[in-house]
Amino acid sequence: MLFEPILICGMEVPNRFVRSATHEWMAGPDGTPTERIGDLYEELAKNETGIIITGYAYVDPRGKSDHLQLGIYDDRFIGEYRKMVSRVHRYNSRIVLQVAHGGRQTMISPEAPYAFAPSAVTEKTKGITPEEMSGEEVLETIENFASAIRRGREAGFDAVQLHCAHGFLLSNFISPYTNRRKDRWGGSTEKRTQVIVDIINRAREMVGHDYPIMVKLNATDGFPEGSKKNALDAPESIEIAKILAVNGVCAIEVSGGIAEAGDELFRTQIDSQEKEAYYKRYSKLIKEAVDVPVILVGGIRSRAVMEKLLEEGYTDMISLCRPFIAEPDLVVKIRKGEIDVVKCVSCNLCSDSSGIKCNYDFGD
C-alpha cells in the first residue's frame, strides 16, 4: 500500500508518503521564501515524496513564532512562492502550504510587542501571558487565514493545511486548557472549533469549494494522563475531527503535544518498533470516525511499521519529519528495497537555526 496512489479532494497523490511541515530557518527576515528552501523542496520532489508540506508560514506579522520563518501575510509573496511551487511540479509530487499563527508562542519583537491568544493563559515555558483577543481581533485573524489560503491557491499550491496543533493559535482555540472564552469561540467543543470552521467558510468564498483545505490537528495536548483536567485529549479531539470533516476539511494529519507538556513534540530514542507511531491510537479512532483521509505523524521509522499502519487501518498516509532531513531520498530507497529502517536516530540535532540539516555523526 505504501506505493499506491490516493485521492484527496480531487488531488491525486502518487504514494502514501508525506513530508510533514518542518520549520527550516531558511526564509528571509520578512518571511520571503528563498531559493534555499526551493532547493530543499525540489530535492524531496525529485526523490518521489508524495506530498511535501512546507514549513509553517505565518498569516500575520504579529503571529511569527521563530526566526527566518516563512510568511504568507501579503500578496507580494505570491510570485516567489509560485517559483518554488513550479520547481516541485517538475516532478510528480504535490506541495501543500501550511499556514499558521503563533498565538501564545508568538515571538516577541517590535512588530509583535505582545502575544495574543483566545484567553490570557500563561505560556509556562516562556513565562509569557498573552492578551485575550477581542472579538474584532478574532474576526481579523479569520480574514488573515482565509487570505493566506487564497494566496496559496494563487501561488499554485496543490492544497493548503491549517496548523491546528503544537500550541499555536488554532491549537489554542480548540484546547479547553488554553481557551476559557465565553463567546461564540469558547465553551463547548463546537464553539472552540468554530474559529476553524469560520476560516474554512470564509476561505471557500475566496477559493471555491474544490480547493483542498487540510488540517494538522492536535489529538492531545500531551500532558501526562490526569495531570491537567482541562487538557485536550480523546474523545474530545475525535469530536473536533468530525466537526472539521463535515465542514469541508479534505484530510486530517494527526499529531499532538504542546511545549508545556515536555518532550512530547519531538520524542528521542525511537530505537524500536514499539516506540514508533506514538499517536497511532488517536489516528485509528479518528479514522474510524471520519470519511476523509487521515495522515499519521510521530516517530515512524521502519517499513514494517509503515505497512502495518496502513494495512490495519490506523492511517491512510505516513507522515515523516526528521527522517526526511537525514534522508531526503528515503522514499526511493524504500521503494527499491534498499532500506527497511530509516537512518534517523531521533536525536533532534537537526533543529539548527542556521538551517535544518542532519548534524548527527553516523561515522560514514
Image (tube, helix red, strand yellow):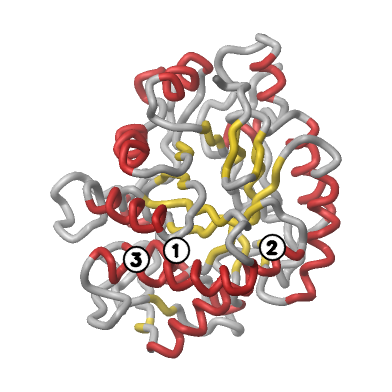
Q: Is residue 193 above or below residue 244?
A: below
Disc sitting over residue 168 in the figure: 1
Helix, strand or loop under label 3? helix
How many marks on residues? 3
Q: Residue at 63% of width from left, 29% of height from top?
A: 5
Q: Nearer the viewer, residue 213 or 168?
A: 213
Q: CA distance from mark 3 to mark 2?
A: 23 Å
Marks 3 and 2, the one that precedes in the sequence: 2
Residue for badge 2: 152
Left or right: 214 as drawn, with respect to 267: right
The residue depicted at 36 percent of the width and 32 percent of the height is 280
The amino acid sitting under disc 2 is Gly
Q: Residues within 10 Å of mark 2 (few under 14, many from 20)?
A: many
| Residue 209 tag number | none
Q: Position of residue 161 (x, y in %)?
A: 56, 55
- Secondary element under disc 2, as helix, strand or loop, is helix
Residue 158 located left or right of residue 62: right
Q: Quadrant of residue 357?
A: top right
Based on the displayed image, in which of its 4 quarters is residue 186 positioned? bottom left
Which residue extends farthest top? 337
The image shows residue 213 at horizontal and vertical percentages of 56, 56
Q: Residue at x 18, y 45 (%)?
A: 225
Q: Which quarter of the figure is the C terminus placed in?
A: top right
- Assign a secondary structure to mark 1: loop
Closer to us: 350 or 71: 71
Q: Earlier in the sequence, mark 2 or mark 1?
A: 2
**Disc 1 residue type?**
Phe
Q: Nearer the viewer, mark 3 or mark 1?
A: 3
Disc 3 residue crowd, few under 14, some 14–19, many 20+, Cα 10 Å: many
Q: Which residue is mark 3?
A: 193
